[in-house]
Image (cartoon, rainbow, N blue to C red):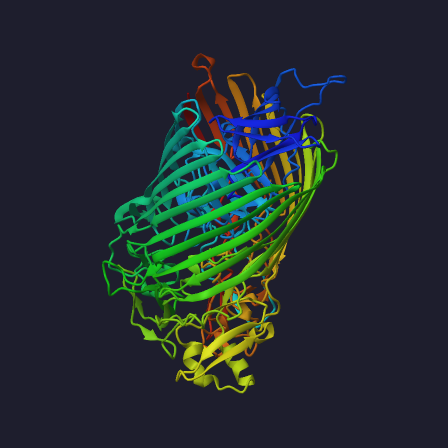
Amino acid sequence: MAQSTTGSIFGQAPAAAGETVSATNATGLTREVAVDSSGRFQISNVPVGVYTVSLKKDGAVVDTRNNVALSPGAGTSVTFSAAAPGTTSLSAVTVQANALPSIDVSSVNSSTVITAADLRKLPVGRSAESIALLAPGTTSGSGYFTGPGNHALVSFGGSSVTENAYYVNGYNTGEPYKNLGGFQLPYGAIDQQETLTGGYNAKYGRSDGGVINQIGKRGTNEWHFGGQVSWQPRFLEGTPVNNYYGHPVVPASTSQVNYALETPSLPGTLHQYRNDNKQWETIYSAYLGGPLIQDKLFMFLAAETTKTQSNNVEVAANQVVQYNTDKNTKFYGKLDWNITDSNILELTALNNRQSTGAGSTYDFDYKTLKAGAFSTANDVTKDNSQFYLAHFTSYITDAATLSVLYGKANFQNPTIYGNTSLLPFISRPQNENPAFLPPGTGPFGIINPQTNTSWDSNDATNGTHGLRADFNYKLSDHDLAVGIDNMSYQAHNQGPNQQNPFNPALNYYWRYISASTVQKREIGWQTSMRTTQKAYYLQDDWQVSPNVLLSIGVRNDHFTNYNDVGKAFVDLKNQWEPRIGASWDVMGDSSFKIYGNAGRYYLALPDNAAERAANTSTYLTTNYSYTGVDPTTGVPTGLTTQDDPATTSPDGEKGLPKDAQQVTARNLKAEYLDEFILGFDKKLNDDWTYGAKAMWRDLKTAIDDECSPGHIADKMTSMGLDPNAYYDSLYGASYCRLINPGMTNTILVKSDDGTQSKLIPMTQQDWGYQQGVKRKTGSLNLYMEHPFDGKWQARVDYTYTRGFGNTEGQVRSDFGQADVSKTEDWDSWQLMDGSNGELANVRKHQLRIRGAYQITPEWLVSGTLLEQSGYPKECLGYYGTGGSGKAYYGPGKPGDPSGYNNYGSGNYHWCNGARVTAGSVGHTPWTTQLNLGVHYSPAFADNKLGINLDVFNALNGQKAVQTDPTGNSSYNRFTNTLNINNSYGDGIYFQPPRTVRLSVTYDY
């Protein structure tokens, strides 16, 4: 529904000959329809905004409703009273202000609409995601994932953060490479934001999470201009809490493995000094809008720039502090041309220029808690985007409407490297052997100025273009629609490059595994690719009776992903998505609605699916013993390889090209879920509405990669084939293939001499999985709402949610894996053993309250509250129970039983020889987020001047919202000893401390 930028006006009028109803907005656009013989009328597909709605008799206005507000994809009810008894004609003219909004009985979707008026009142963060969190059923995503503008992301209904869709004025503005977040309007240019949590009809798709739809402001017949200056000063920010090493207690088993704390001296010592990690933010914004030609041509321009200065003292092991300056500038422009009352053209331009990380890095002494010598200039990440949209609407007749939208976008995201170090990165220096370090080195080892493990291209780009066409026809009681919805994505030079641009010979970094082992890692998979997404739909909104609306539709999606040489490796056709919904206007006066909805929703793979899965990629590891550590660079010395072969790849990524036909199951199906909703909305009285909604979501199919070629070889042997004749196909360019976990996947393999190819059917049992994809979420939301009546408004939501399964979705929140649909899940059956538990993006209890009170015409106070239960904790470690013949802890080789723990520590749902499911070891604490606002609009400035004070997290709660899940840090295969990670259970992300925003606005 977020591609919708229009709404409808419907209602009842006294039935009489010659009656019509007209609606006129602030641009002079007028639509007029006849009242039918039963007294019903409906004005469909008109731009959102505020309308004056008039009842006419033989062309003369006899009754009027003012300030009728429309929301996207929804209907607003307007009722004209019948004439008094004995009256033979409608002749007396009446004008009424519109009453408080009635319940929308014309819609079966689940959405929360926040208007510009709401944003002026409520203390809300200046991002689409902060606004979306006002909707029930949403939660903040893991701090590992951020979108454009460094905004934290949102999960809907337990889905992962990449499964959402973002729209501005009907065009998809989602981050085009991984779909992590989306590009947004300048805050002051938002007219409405609709947050859809489910239940949308067949016109819309490509999301099995939620949808964020922003509609920008437009010019009207009156000139308006204004601006805002906002400060978030550092000195009013609460002091961030320091993070100390805890006393990690991991689940213990009675197995034959020995385990002990990695560094017994660390508990109680400072893990990260955070007291000084504060920021100062300044925002400048301005807008101008009005008529270029009265009633015909209108313009609206808005610009906003945000500058943030921050400190970041990193964890003690890194021994550095960063001083950063980020800048984000947005521009929005819109032209609206009422060519005629029946033809409208809208042109939109959106520009977003972001620079992140400018500044310098200095050494930091954890003994004195002071910054030291200059280390390096920071790397600066740029993210520049431009969107251009054209939307034409033609009201061909009162019954027929045509809408055509075309958009194009370009993205440049280069990295400007300030760090010119010629040295390799040193990972986990705390594991360096103390015997090889100079006296007084401290517990965190030796590092060097290098801060990068890989490098991005300075000409990395993305592009999108899309066409949407919708034709609506009103036929008696049927509102019929048919249309197409096509998008195309193209990426160039995305992903990390192996080589340091300042030292081309350097294509690796060092990771210290233990006091005896160091690992050399060589990585790089910079590549290009493209994706097409096409769809068509049929939709019928059938008014079965005056009180019952039935919404029936079907959608067909076609997704194709191409690799770096233009060959399709995923081509998913004929994905039929039935949608059916019903709305019962129980009393016939829009005061009580019972509704339900059932639908299937498919999700496409983003461009990122080709990275590593279908394109050339390198990920090589070599384990060494070492006899020393360079005292100035941290580089290991005296190296001797430990394994045979010395260099291996966890997933067979050896820099060789991949065959597009072999990297994907030949019968692959797209990810989809089924959703069911049942609810009611009811007026308690003229001031209050209450209701309840139950929702059930069941993920039926997912796509992820599987990386156990030995299992394919076993199946080939059982089929009478010799796997050795297909060795290159199985173990060559990549071990991994995209599959539907739990289903029978047909895998293509080719013989080494190129003369034969075979299709190998791999069942769930062949892979060794105990079950297929499982992600089930059920929720119940209860609410009461008092709409703003000129004096006050309030809404209270309580949401109870239960979610369980063995997969979060396209990404992993527990340790921040953003390889979309290529997570470690399903790489082997051992990685899935113990995965069936609570879902990362589900909070069992949530209480939301928002409200505003107009004390006087000059003073207004407001607040929002989000109280919720915690995140499910985990304990990840090595697989198995330990002991001779009972587990396989060695790094191993492909096809070797000891390869079960190729992924090492922190990856398996096992800890100290015990199986541990998510949530079985507890949850993070409940959190309270209370935001308060005070707004002063002095009468001497005609209430056009605003002086505002907003306090975020007023109670300054700073509890951990996510903790370190890695229970085991390393394993000594010679002594059968597991080490307990020092930071297991320590917070890695916290509630931001209290901040204060001061702002001055002027609106003329």
Q: In this view, does 600 lie above or below 832?
A: above
Q: In which quarter of the image is residue 291?
A: top left
Q: How many marks?
A: 0
Kindly tell me whether residue 676 is visible in this rendering.
yes
Q: Along the line of sight, which residue is nearer the eye, 145 or 333?
A: 333
Image quadrant in which the C terminus is located: top left
Q: In this view, does 97 lie above or below 635?
A: above
Residue 636 rendering spot, x and y as whole percentages: 31, 66
Image quadrant in which the N terminus is located: top right
Q: Is residue 39 above or below residue 740?
A: above
Q: Along the line of sight, which residue is nearer the eye, 111 or 925?
A: 111
Give me the residue at 53% from left, 45% from top.
471
Q: Along the line of sight, which residue is nearer the eye, 107 or 973?
A: 107
Q: Along the line of sight, which residue is nearer the eye, 973 or 45?
A: 45
Left of 89 or right of it: where is 270? left
Residue 220 rendering spot, x and y as whole percentages: 44, 26
Give me the residue at 36% from left, 33% from top.
303
Left of 706 or right of it: where is 586? right
Residue found farthest to the right: 86
Kindly tell me whether residue 960 is visible in this rendering.
no
Residue 892 rendering spot, x and y as whole percentages: 45, 76
Residue found farthest to the top: 940
Residue 992 rendering spot, x and y as whole percentages: 47, 40
